[in-house]
Image (cartoon, rainbow, N blue to C red):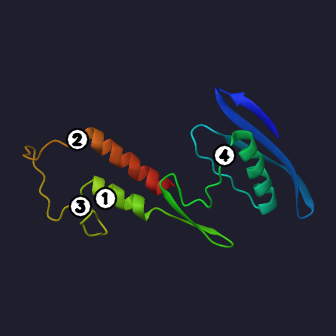
Amino acid sequence: MQACASSGSPSVLVSTDCTHGARRHREWWWVCVYVDDLIITGMIKKKVEAFKGEMQWLFHMSDLGLLSYYLRTKVKQHQEAATLGQAAYAQKLLKKAGMQDCNSCQAPMEVRLKMTKASSTPMVDSTMWRSLVGSLWYLVHT
C-alpha cells in the first residue's frame, strides 16, 4: 500500500494483482478521504476486509457496516446483488415543488389552459425553478 498527500487530503493508492478466468489483469483502487465517509467495495470479500483493516490502521477509522444510502440513493444489499432506489428523493422533490398531493398523469399540463399576453399570475422564482430542474436532471440520470 502506498500513501501520499494530495492537495492537503490524504489519499491511498492500492494495487492488487488478481486472476479472472484465464486472463490476468491489474486492479487499481483509488480512495480519497475528504470528509469523514468512505465507501469500499469489491468482489473478493477477503481482499475487501484486508483493505479495510489497513485503512482502519492508517486513518484510525471505524467500520459502519453495509451501505444504506449514497448520494440520495437508497442501497439495499442482497446476497448476490444490490438494488438502488430513489423514491424518497423523488418524494422530497415533489414536496419541494409543492406537488406532493398531485396525481400522476401522461401529459403533465393544466387541463383547458388558456394562454394570454397579460397574466395575473405571480412571476416564477427562477432560482427555485433552476434548482428543481437540476434536481430532476440528477434524478433521471442517476
Measuring from the top left, give residue 60's x and y in whole percent. Answer: 69, 42
Answer with mark 3 or mark 1, whichever residue precedes in sequence.
1
Numbered label attached to residue 125 = 2
Residue shown at 42% from the left, 64% from the top:
87
Residue at image location 76% in from the left, 50% down from the top: 53
- Judge depth for marks 2 and 4 and give the one in front: 4
The numbered mark, 4 or 1, whose residue comes first in the sequence reads 4
Residue 44 shows in the view? no
On the image, the x and y values in percent for residue 65 come to: 62, 59
Alpha carbon of mark 2 to alpha carbon of mark 4: how far?
44 Å
Among the two numbered marks 4 and 3 on one chain, the one whose residue lies closer to the N terminus: 4
Mark 4 crowd level (few <14, some 14–19, many ≥20, 10 Å Cα):
some
- The first of marks 2 and 1 along the sequence is 1
- Check disc 3: other Cα within 10 Å, few if <14, some if 14-19, many if 20+: few
Pointers 4 and 1 in contact (CB under 8 A)?
Answer: no
Which amino acid is tagged 4?
A: Met
Mark 3 to mark 1: distance in Å? 15 Å
- Disc 4 marks which residue? 61
How far apart, in angstroms, are the residues tagged by discs 4 and 3? 51 Å
Could you tell me how far apart the alpha carbons at marks 4 and 1 are, in whole angstroms? 37 Å
Q: Amino acid at mark 3?
A: Met
Q: Which mark is residue 94?
A: 1
Residue type, label 2 = Asp
**Which dot marks residue 109?**
3
